[in-house]
Amino acid sequence: MYNLDLDLQQIIRDRLHISLSDIEAYCQRWQITEFALFGSVLRDDFRSDSDVDVLITFAPSRRWSLFDLMEMQRELETAFERKVDLVQKKELKNPYRRANILKTHRVVYAN
């Protein structure tokens, strides 16, 4: 498990209502090598109707179908009890969006 600062641990606990061990199990099951948060979940403007932006990286040899990706997103939405925007790091093609996300994201799990 990645070494998280207390601020990020509190965000996960208070805003996502999930344990770090549950995130780790999710990442291991789906062969995710990096799981990060970005967007409003990390800021003061996060509200009860905000979605959760998640940035993921898969193991290099792993390829998932669209149905698998939809299931991954559904699992997170169930766990977080809110909508999830699941973004693959390798799919960030727009250079401005990529730069903004990579500048502000916070890694929760890395293996």
Image (cartoon, rainbow, N blue to C red):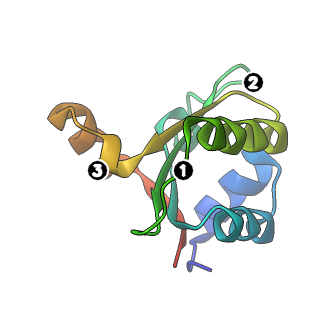
Residue corresponding to mark 1: 64
- Amino acid bearing label 3: Lys
Between the residue at mark 2 and the residue at mark 1, the CA separation in whole angstroms equals 31 Å
Residue 38 locus on image (x, y percent)? 47, 44
Residue 24 locus on image (x, y percent)? 70, 70
User: Earlier along the polypeptide chain: callout 2 or callout 1?
Assistant: 2
> For the residues carrying marks 1 and 3, which lies nearer the camera in this image?
1
Residue corresponding to mark 3: 103
Residue corresponding to mark 2: 48
Number of numbered discs present? 3
Q: Are marks 3 and 2 in contact (CB under 8 Å)?
A: no
- Amino acid bearing label 2: Ser
Pick the front one: 62 or 106: 62
Identity of the residue drawn at 67% across and 71% down? 28
Between the residue at mark 3 and the residue at mark 2, the CA separation in whole angstroms equals 25 Å
Instruction: Report which quarter residue 78 is drawn in.
Output: top right
> For the residues carrying marks 2 and 1, which lies nearer the camera in this image?
1
Identity of the residue drawn at 62% across and 80% down? 1
Q: Are marks 1 and 3 in contact (CB under 8 Å)?
A: no
Above or below 68: residue 63: below
User: Earlier along the polypeptide chain: callout 3 or callout 2?
Assistant: 2
Pick the front one: 85 or 71: 71
